[in-house]
Image (tube, helix red, strand yellow):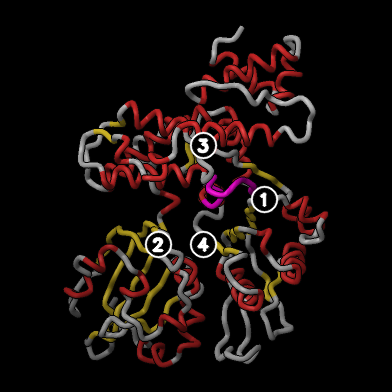
């Protein structure tokens, strides 16, 4: 970057500098000659999770935390004659999320021909990154994979959901992938080049959460020594994902409802609103309708968020996906750890197939990561699985499944017999189906009701177990 006549004035005028770089739709970082941060723009705040006030004066590697920072930073070789350098790497943001980026670096030269500092332009390339070759496109949407009927139906809906700006409510048990789905919707939308900002509504006390979401003015409360841009404004032209929306305090539910109606943010300590163009996606593992009846969640906010509802099924309802996910995680972690693991032994695979996964896909992912990490052979054996899986007999997982199934049937007088036994979960499930068909006189709809399933699920399982 040659002879910027106003660079010294800009460095001495943070207000003017902020106004200029905040209009640039990619991350901008300005450094002094010692590679300490002078300032960064709003886009990079959103990408890294660090505000410019807390980043000022700190070495850039503490904020970007890029892989290249710990190898050989190009800035170390730059002098006043250097040309701009561009490279691809990744950063670890404040939420410990790994984000692929493209960085362009250049020295800033003053009128005397000396280095006045450095400029870095940081581009988020998640939206244009290709998927891993092992992920079959027919069974995926973004980084989410599956081939079960419920997931196939979901994949058909998601492109349509991504291309509109309606609020989305994602429901599902803990570990089903709500965060990943929200980001996939963002990356497939017209807002993909904008920031994706995530806020956990249950992670902060009410006073701090309000400031984090809506921002505050200097002096708004004790300790507010500077103006703060809230997450809504950081998500400008992008998507704000409010995870665990069921934990949002009632007072902030009112403020969120107001924003959804008029798209205006009112920072703490200010009566002047700021218009923000943001799409809101909310996620929860709670039953919001039940919370409405209990007076813990506003009904009008539920209606406003529930324009489009997407439910992620638990892993126990995605039997066709289990092997697909196991192989997917095995391939990913084998490459990540530089190992050549071909698969699983039959004992290890059987244990993985019969476990109930109360932590859903996240738990399965952690199990495979652990196993690949410690495995020194060409196949993962039962001894490489986490101890809690090995110590628990198969029957414990089976009883957990049957217990959950019986519970799902409510207080109906007719229940699945408790004396059904078998050597594995498939044996027990087959006996349960036969028992339900016998007691319903062969009527499938009644048998499905006794089992707590849909008719299509019963038909599919009858075909699986060759029950005519």
What are the residue bounds of the magenta stretch? 169-179
- 177 part of magenta stretch: yes
- Residue hosting label 2: 123
Q: Nearer the viewer, mark 3 or mark 4?
A: 3
Of discs 4 and 1, which sits in the foreground? 1
The image's mark for residue 221 is: none
Give above or below for 214 relative to 286. Answer: below
Q: As rendered, which of 243 and 231 lies closer to the eye?
A: 243
Q: Residues within 10 Å of mark 3 (few under 14, many from 20)?
A: many
Mark toward the start of the polypeptide (2 vs 3): 2
How far apart are the alpha carbons under marks 1 and 3? 26 Å
Q: Are marks 3 and 4 in contact (CB under 8 Å)?
A: no
Q: Residue at x 72, y 66 (%)?
A: 256
Position above or below: 99 against 327: below
Tag 2 or tag 1, which sits nearer the N-term?
2
Q: Quadrant of residue 79?
A: bottom left
- Label 1 to label 2: alpha-carbon separation: 29 Å
Q: According to the image, label 4 marks what residue? A: 195
> Is residue 268 visible in this depiction of the protein?
yes
Nearer to us: label 2 or label 3 = 3
Q: Circle 3 sits on which residue?
A: 356
- The CA span between labels 2 and 4 is 11 Å
Relative horizontal placement of residue 160, taking residue 38 as reference (left or right): right
Comes first in the chain, label 3 or label 4: 4
């Amino acid at each position: 970057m040659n002879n910027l006549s106003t660079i010294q004035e800009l460095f001495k005028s943070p207000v003017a500098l902020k106004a200029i770089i905040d209009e640039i739709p990619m991350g901008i970082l300005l450094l002094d000659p010692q590679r300490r941060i002078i300032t960064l723009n709003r886009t990079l705040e959103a990408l890294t999770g660090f505000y410019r006030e807390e980043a000022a004066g700190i070495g850039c590697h503490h904020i970007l935390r890029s892989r290249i920072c710990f190898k050989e930073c190009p800035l170390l070789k730059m002098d006043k004659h250097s040309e701009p350098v561009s490279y691809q790497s990744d950063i670890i943001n404040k939420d410990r999320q790994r984000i692929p980026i493209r960085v362009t670096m250049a020295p800033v030269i003053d009128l005397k021909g000396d280095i006045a500092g450095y400029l870095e332009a940081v581009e988020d390339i998640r939206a244009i990154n290709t998927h891993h070759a092992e992920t079959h496109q027919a069974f995926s949407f973004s980084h989410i994979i599956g081939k079960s009927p419920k997931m196939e139906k979901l994949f058909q809906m998601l492109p349509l959901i991504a291309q509109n700006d309606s609020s989305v409510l994602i429901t599902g048990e803990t570990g089903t992938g709500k965060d990943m789905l929200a980001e996939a919707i963002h990356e497939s939308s017209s807002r993909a080049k904008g920031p994706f900002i995530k806020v956990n509504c249950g992670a902060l006390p009410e006073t701090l959460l309000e400031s984090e979401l809506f921002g505050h003015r200097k002096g708004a409360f004790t300790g507010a020594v500077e103006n703060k841009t809230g997450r809504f404004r950081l998500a400008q032209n992008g998507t704000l994902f409010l995870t665990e929306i069921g934990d949002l305090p009632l007072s902030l539910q009112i403020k969120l409802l107001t924003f959804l109606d008029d798209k205006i943010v009112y920072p703490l300590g200010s009566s002047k609103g700021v218009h923000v163009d943001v799409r809101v996606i909310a996620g929860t593992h709670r039953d919001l309708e039940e919370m409405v009846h209990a007076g813990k969640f506003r009904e009008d906010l539920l209606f406003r968020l529930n324009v489009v509802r997407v439910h992620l099924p638990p892993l126990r309802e995605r039997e066709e996906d289990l092997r697909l996910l196991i192989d997917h995680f095995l391939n990913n972690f084998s490459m990540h750890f530089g190992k050549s693991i071909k698969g699983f032994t039959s004992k290890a695979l059987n244990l993985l197939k019969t476990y109930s996964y109360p932590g859903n896909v996240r738990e399965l992912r952690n199990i495979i990561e652990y196993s690949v990490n410690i495995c020194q052979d060409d196949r993962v054996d039962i001894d490489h699985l986490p101890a809690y899986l090995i110590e628990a007999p198969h029957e414990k997982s089976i009883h957990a499944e049957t217990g959950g199934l019986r519970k799902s049937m409510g207080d109906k007088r007719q229940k699945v017999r408790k004396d059904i036994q078998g050597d594995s979960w498939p044996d027990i499930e087959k006996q349960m189906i036969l028992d339900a068909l016998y007691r319903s006189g062969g009527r499938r709809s009644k048998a499905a009701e006794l089992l707590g399933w849909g008719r299509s699920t019963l038909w599919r399982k009858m075909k699986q177990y060759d029950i005519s």
